Amino acid sequence: MSKIKSNTTATKDEPLNADAVASYLRQNPDFFNQRSSLLADIELAHDCGQATSLIERQTQVMRQKIKDNADRMSDILTTARRNDVQFEKTKRLVITLAAAANLNDLTEALKQSFIGEFHADAVHLAIFSGLNVTDTHPCLSSAEDPEENTYNAEIKALASNNWAYCQDFKVTSMSHLFVHHSKLKSSAIVPLYLADQPLGVLIIASNCADHYSDQLDTLFLNHVAAVTGRCLGRIQV
């Protein structure tokens, strides 16, 4: 009896609040196993206003946790499958770029890949000073063309930094490169470098405003840029 009184006194000395009760129950998850009769007295408000038992509420919580975990796993698997598909597309593009014998071949490989497999609507490769553009692919041009002096500086400015980025389609600076530019809404800008030397810029455009949004991960585009830059250097040697 004295032991019980001692525990009662200790409890009275310590303030009892909701946080203390919650902490105790977390540390003693089997508390209700020894006091199952208490479960009959516990009522929890249901979403529809009715009372529900603790066991029912626990079941609801566990079901929701299972659903959340299943959803997360589904998202992970979906992302993994998407990455696998993108890897295969990228591998095919790299192989085709490596086999390109001239700028026409290189430009056609980029066009076929981005329009045919990555769902872009237009592609253009603009080449900078130091590279002799004698090929006549419709998606290929030189940023040194004297007839396009008005636009050359703007095109070169797109490659001022050596990393890919996405933006709204700029009608003022890029429209002359694309026949159907009035439909284009978003673009990916892919500067092409060999070491520190800028060789050109690849512009990929879409009719969809959010296809190339500024939230897009550009890791894949930077990989394509690195491979294309090396291929440009090889072709022009």
Image (cartoon, rainbow, N blue to C red):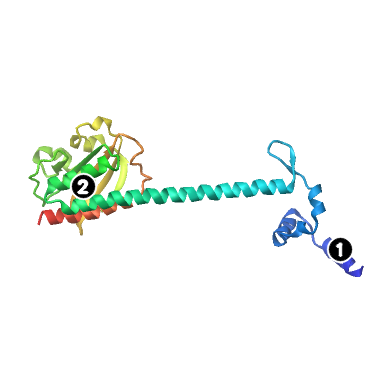
Q: Is residue 206 above or below residue 7?
A: above
Q: Position of residue 110 (x, y in %)?
A: 21, 45
Q: Determine the image quadrant of residue 142.
A: top left
Q: Nearer the viewer, residue 53 or 189?
A: 53
Q: Residues within 10 Å of mark 1 (few under 14, many from 20)?
A: few
Question: Mark 1 or mark 2, which is nearer the start of the sequence?
Answer: 1
Q: Is residue 234 left or right of residue 220?
A: left
Badge 2 element: strand
Q: Residue at x 9, y 44 (%)?
A: 135
Q: Where does residue 232 sit, x and y in percent of width and height?
A: 15, 53
Judging depth in this view, the residue of 5 and 153 nearest the camera is 5
Badge 1 element: helix
Using the image, tell me which numbered label, if any, was put on residue 148.
none
Q: Position of residue 219 (x, y in %)?
A: 33, 52
Disc 2 residue crowd, few under 14, some 14–19, many 20+, Cα 10 Å = many
Q: CA distance from mark 2 to mark 1?
A: 79 Å
Give, as a three-letter code, the residue at label 2.
Val
Q: Amino acid at mark 1?
A: Thr
Residue 140 at x, y = what percent?
A: 15, 42
Whether residue 161 can be seen here = no
Circles 2 and 1 in contact, beta carbons < 8 Å: no
Query: Is residue 120 in view from this perspective?
Result: yes
- In the picture, the quarter occupied by the C terminus is bottom left
Image side of residue 33 versus residue 129, left or right:
right
Quarter occupied by residue 28: bottom right
Residue for badge 2: 201
Which residue was labeled with disc 1?
8
- Of all residues, the one furthest to the right in this rendering is 1
Q: 169 above or below 64?
A: above
Work out whether 136 lies above or below 217: above
Between 174 and 232, the one nearer to me in the picture = 232
